Amino acid sequence: MGSVVRSAVKAIKEKGFGSFLRELRDEGYLTALLDGNLMQTKIHNIGATLVGVDKFGNKYYEKLGDTQYGRHRWVEYAAKDRYNASQVPPEWHGWLHFITDHTGDELLLLKPTRYGLEHKENLSGEGDQYIYHSKGHSLNPGQRDWTRYQPWQPTKA
């Protein structure tokens, strides 16, 4: 918590109080008060370096120095109301998980053009149209008719 206060005081000294408050509003800190995960990310962003932005609007940050190794790279998702890890494209996934030190923008320049598939997020579990229901499930519109089923009856001896 002390590093957050130090970073905030440093930002106020550098930019001025009015500019600091405008930046808080523009960066979405006021709306982050309702979402604990987003607020934690916003606090963590103080003093961090914006490394890049992907085509979906996700922002990628890095904070070297006083941050624990393995926790110094993170993403702030563009969709603040619903977010999951499949919204990160593969070129940025490698950078986030320390597979490569090249950022996603650098890897896009190296990517051959013959690989034409665009990244899509995994929508399983998002809405009824993306959830798989087996044939016998009550929510499956093509539900099986189970009238042929005959329960086993033990014989009395």
Image (tube, helix red, strand yellow):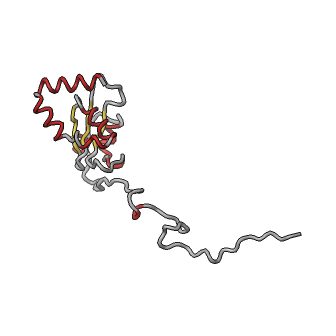
Q: Residue furthest right?
A: 157
Query: Of residues 56 and 150, which is closer to you in this image?
Result: 150
Q: Is residue 54 above or below residue 44?
A: below
Q: Position of residue 62 (x, y in %)?
A: 27, 32
Q: Position of residue 152 (x, y in %)?
A: 74, 70
Query: Of residues 55 and 125, which is closer to you in this image?
Result: 125
Question: Left or right: 88 with respect to 133?
Answer: left
If the image is split into quadrants, where does the C terminus sit?
A: bottom right
Q: Position of residue 49 (x, y in %)?
A: 22, 32
Residue depicted at x 24% and y 43%: 31
Residue depicted at x 55% and y 68%: 136
Query: Of residues 126 and 120, which is closer to you in this image?
Result: 126
Instruction: Choose top left, top right, bottom left or bottom right for residue 151.
Output: bottom right
Q: Is residue 77 above or below residue 50?
A: below
If the image is split into quadrants, where does the N terminus sit?
A: top left
Instruction: Choose top left, top right, bottom left or bottom right for residue 37.
Output: top left
Q: Position of residue 155 (x, y in %)?
A: 83, 71
Q: Is residue 154 above or below residue 126?
A: below
Residue depicted at x 37% and y 56%: 123
Q: Tag count in the figure? A: 0
Question: Left or right: 6 with respect to 126?
Answer: left
